[in-house]
Image: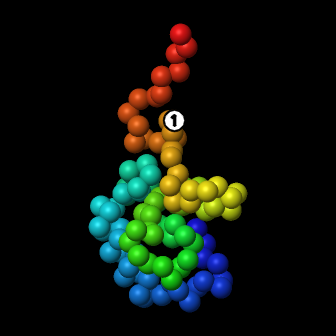
Amino acid sequence: MSIRPENRKYYGKAWRKVRDAIVHRRRHKCEICHLGPPDTPPLTVHHRDRDPTNNDPANLLVCCPRHHFQQETLINAGHQYPGQLEISWPYSRARASPPNTATQ
């Protein structure tokens, strides 16, 4: 994700320290698909409330670039649960088997 020009001032050395700590604390895995390097490009950290000054760990979501983009897209589309995306099969490797689609 590219950083908006008006927010660049919030992403200096202090942010990199916060980002590195939260990625380490969350075990270097995307919190949505549970993949991490080397299976994904470098992980990113998403601000659930989109406020770059709110670095409370509860507001930060570690995710792969694909899911970070998906979170931003949902927020821009006006979904009511930013940061709470439920990924369903086949898009998530976290679910072991497909949902039961058999009809009775």
Give the left or right position of residue 68, taking residue 30 as reference: right
Please, what is the three-letter code of the amino acid marked with disc 1?
Pro
Q: Residue at x 41, y 37 (%)?
A: 95
Q: Residue at x 38, y 72 (%)?
A: 57
> For residue 96, what is the image quadrant?
top left
> For residue 8, what is the image quadrant?
bottom right
Q: Which x, y percent locates residue 2?
A: 61, 72
The answer to whether any part of residue 84 appears in the image is: yes
> For residue 59, what is the image quadrant?
bottom left
Q: Is residue 93 above or below residue 8?
A: above
Q: Residue lying furthest front in this view? A: 80
Q: Residue at x 52, y 51 (%)?
A: 85
Residue bearing the label numbered 1: 90
Q: Is residue 96 above or below residue 16?
A: above
**Total number of numbered discs in the rendering:** 1
Q: Is residue 86 above or below residue 54?
A: above
Give the left or right position of residue 7, taking residue 31 as reference: right
The answer to whether any part of residue 73 appears in the image is: no
Which secondary structure lies at badge 1? loop
| Mark 1 neighbour class, 10 Å CA radius: few under 14, some 14 to 19, many 20 or more | few
Q: Which x, y percent locates residue 31?
A: 41, 55
